Amino acid sequence: MKNRQKSIFYTLFLAITFTIIIAVLIVSKIFYDQTKELIIKDIKSDVKTSLSLLKNSIYPFMDSYSVHEYENLIANELNRKYTLAIVVEDYNMAKILNSKYLVGKINNNQKIEDYDQNNETHQEMINNSYLNIKDDIYNQNGLKLGNIAIYASYDLVEEKLENIITLSIIITLLSTMIVLLVLYFVIHKIVQKPLNSIIKIINNKTADGIPIGKIPSYDSKELAILSSTLNNMISSIKDSRYRLDQNIAFLRSYELALDKSSIVTKSDLNGKIIYANEYFYNISGFKPEEVIGKSHNIVRHKETPKELYIELWKTIGNKKVWKGILKNRGKLSDYWVDSTILPILDENQDIVEFIAVRHDITKMINQQKQLDKIANTDTLTNLGNRYKLIRDISRSSNPALAIINIDNFSELNDFYGYEVGDYIIKQVGQHISGVTRHKNTYTYHIQGDEYVLFNHDIDKDEFEKNIHKLVDIFADISVEVDEEELNFNFTIGVSFESKDKILPSADMALKVAKRNNENIVVFSEAISLNKEYENNIYWTKKIRGAIFEDSFIPVYQPIINNKTNKIEKYESLVRMKDKDRLISPFFFLEISKKTKYYSTITKIMIEKSFERFKDSSIEFSINITIEDILNNEIKEYIYNMLIKYSIASRVVFEIVETESIENFKAVLGFINKIKELGSKIAIDDFGTGYSNFDYLMKLNADYIKIDGSLIKEIDTNKQAQAVVSTIVDFAKRMDIKTIAEFVENKNIQNKVIELGIDYSQGYFFSEPKVDI
């Protein structure tokens, strides 16, 4: 049944009406009681007056036995409005008649009758009388002549009360009606009409339920407050709605942007897909009916470790965001995504669903693979380069290595020229690679006239035996130059040392072989200890003396902004001052690490660089290693110096040797701390070795310094150009600035500018100088 709501005016009017009626009833009752009391009081007073008059008038007639006379007096007095009966007991007549003598008059229904004590009707009327007053009658001598009784009728009281009450009720009702009418018009004008006006304005609303008009102000204080409050509320609602519409528009824009740029899916608590955007269908090749209601396992790639998914579900199950890179299975082809998966919570902080936002990074991954291939391949021979060799050594379990050097190659180079020299290097590399048939033995070209044969897991005797066989085979290697066959002699250094020592120890064996004019020398402890001992003693003395004499100094190389072609910053580089020359860190830095002087040199460089730039507005960079970052003493020193000099915003820390990062948590902690203090981060030598984009994103770098080995060949080598172009493209998308190192001539600088590299550094502009 439909609920019919009543008007507040109707309810208010009824409430006031009932209140007035109740008030009238209460007043009428009080008036009735008071009027009744007054009437009775008047009757009593009237009766007493009548009684007193009759007594004084009757007693002479009673003395003279004139009954008829005082009966007339009684009859006359009975005409009073409230008197029912007057009865006189006459003692004189009683003596004569020898019996009780009662005489009187009674008003029987407006008919005056002689009172008869034997009349039952008269007796009943007397007994039911409302009031009776009786008094004795005396003569002048004080003789008691009898008594007189006057009886009052209640009917007469009620009659008078009814008349008064009727008149009172008529007056009250008329007054009430007048009050109600006045009240009705007052309420209608002051309350209902303004409220109806307000309601009309409120009901005139938009589709969203927001009133269009403005409520007018009223003279009444309460209505004025109500009007102001409602107008403020409506204004606030309109503002909120406007902001809500804006936010909805923004959210729709964001949603559209997200849908156009990202792969988006939603899943329920069981991992079943409940929504997927068009991007998902386009890249995966699936159709909606093949996806909706199915588990996310539909895109899980078999190469992804099970442990990764366990960790993923554990993270989002704990109401945290999971981020990572995943390889997904598509219907037509596989693809790589940078994924962010987050739980959606309700108002009770319970998970209701999961949303996954993914960015297609397949191109980036493929570029990285290509970059890795280029970065680990020697561009001249197409063999593995030094970085590839170092990586393979690090992954080996039982390594064996031989460095092969072409004897007297520098003379051939000088005689025939560099182009022929490069041709010879390429041809010899092909021959060496071609005669190396062991399945786990790989050929590398690591520099100039040196090649490496490396096996990651082979018996020592077998490897050494194979190398000796190769000496005879190498003797037959020839290269035709200017219609002339050139033959070569080779010197080989072999090592079976541990992964971290095998390459330098093989190089040491090679040097011994050349010095002793032997074809092959296998490294032994005797060779190692003698050479290393001599070298360490020499440089340890030099380092200790340089520290004592304050001979470690920074030199500064400018970094040029390629848009303005002006110096914008400097790199601070360490040198050892030795008489009139400056010694490169190549000669002393590794020894300083072994002899525990390295941290002292780091502190000297930081303090002198900070001191030099403390009063300058120029940005400068300092090289630090992973070893510095993991050294708590150095870390605290860096933090304290940044605070002491208050120049953190102008300091860039260039992290070198990033391929050796193992404790990512500690490194990221350091990076976050110095960024919190205001400094920036640069990654040095990017583009070779272990460089990869995922690695770069984790380090949150501000600058990438592109490795010099790529920049040196950028104007002539298309592969180097491709690698650098890929790095620059990635950096721009990640809002990371790029710096080209080893810019040595104008051709290189032109190519650097063409590829969009932000900054340049190298001898083309200036060598590192002691002062700026």
Image (cartoon, rainbow, N blue to C red):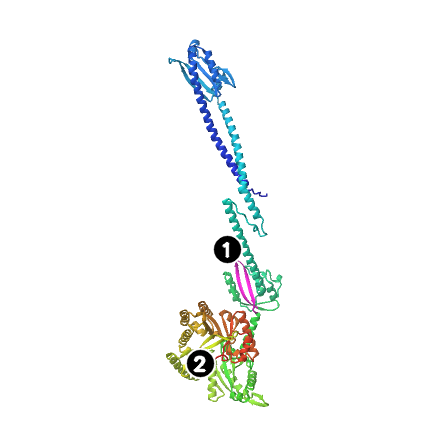
Relative to residue 489, is residue 6 depicted above or below?
Answer: above
Q: Quadrant of the C terminus?
A: bottom left
In the image, residue 623 lies at what x, y percent?
45, 75
Of residue 648 and residue 120, the one placed in the foreground of this image is 648
Left or right of 545, for residue 75: right
Of residue 527 and residue 665, the one placed in the foreground of this image is 665
Left or right of 435, for residue 675: left
Residue at image coords 58%, 88%: 480
Q: How crowded is mark 1: few (under 14 residues within 10 Å), some or many (20 or more)?
A: few
In the image, residue 619 lies at what x, y percent?
46, 72
Q: Which residue is at the far bottom?
A: 484
Q: Per the image, is 356 magenta?
A: yes
Q: Per the image, is 745 magenta?
A: no
The answer to which of marks 1 and 2 sits earlier in the sequence is 1
Please state which amino acid type lies under the numbered disc 2: Ser
User: Helix, strand or loop at disc 2?
Assistant: loop
Give the residue number, with chain letter if any, for mark 1.
348
Q: How crowded is mark 2: few (under 14 residues within 10 Å), some or many (20 or more)?
A: few
Question: Magenta residues, as a range?
Answer: 336-361
Left or right of 717, for residue 32: left
Please state which amino acid type lies under the numbered disc 1: Asn
In the image, residue 534 lies at what x, y percent?
41, 84
**Contact between labelled residues 2 and 1, with CB atoms less than 8 Å apart:** no
Q: Which mark is residue 767?
A: none
Q: Quadrant of the N terminus?
A: top right
Give the residue number, with chain letter if any, for mark 2.
584
Tell me the CA gap for discs 1 and 2.
Answer: 64 Å
Q: Which residue is at the far front?
A: 219
